[in-house]
């Protein structure tokens, strides 16, 4: 007889795998829809705070550009890595 903890673990893993497959299918649908609606356009995610506006790549880059396949605006690569922050007038 299989120990109930092992069986529960097996069922948990199976559920996670099914959710992963669903998530991958959903991601493919989103990528397809985005590729049609934003074709030829570029994007940048701006992080707005009380003292500055900055281009964010650290937190959103992997989602926007790698996962969703969106094209970064050319200025994104120019501005990334610059530590200078300027105040918003």
Image (cartoon, rainbow, N blue to C red):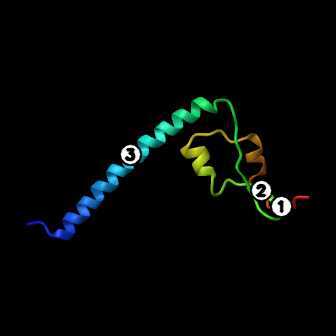
Q: Are the residues at dot 1 and dot 2 in contact (C-beta closer than 8 Å)?
A: yes
What whole-number distance in Å separates the C-alpha atoms at marks 2 and 3? 34 Å
Q: Element under label 2?
A: strand
Marking on residue 22: 3
Where, quadrant-wise, is the C terminus in this rendering?
bottom right
Is residue 24 depicted above or below 33 in this figure?
below
Viewer-proximal residue among 75 and 21? 21
Upstream in the sequence, badge 3 or badge 1?
3
Which x, y percent locates residue 87? 87, 61
Q: Element under label 1?
A: loop
Which x, y percent locates residue 35? 58, 32
Residue at point 25%, 64% (across, down)? 9
What whole-number distance in Å separates the C-alpha atoms at marks 1 and 2? 7 Å
Residue at point 58%, 49% (across, down)? 63
Where, quadrant-wise, is the N terminus in this rendering?
bottom left
Within 10 Å of disc 1 (Cα), the crowding (few <14, some 14-19, many 20+) is few
Residue at point 45%, 42% (across, down)? 26
Within 10 Å of disc 2 (Cα), the crowding (few <14, some 14-19, many 20+) is some
Marking on residue 85: 1
Q: Nearer the viewer, mark 3 or mark 1?
A: 3
What whole-number distance in Å separates the C-alpha atoms at marks 3 and 1? 41 Å
Disc 2 designates what residue? 54
Upstream in the sequence, badge 1 or badge 2?
2
């Amino acid at each position: 007889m299989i120990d109930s903890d092992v069986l529960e673990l097996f069922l948990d893993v199976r559920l996670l795998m099914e959710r992963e497959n669903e998530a991958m299918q959903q991601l493919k649908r989103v990528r397809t829809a985005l590729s049609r609606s934003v074709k030829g356009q570029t994007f940048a995610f701006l992080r707005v705070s009380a003292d500055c506006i900055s281009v964010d790549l650290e937190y959103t880059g992997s989602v926007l550009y790698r996962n969703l396949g969106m094209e970064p605006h050319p200025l994104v690569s120019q501005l990334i890595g610059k530590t200078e922050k300027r105040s918003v007038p």
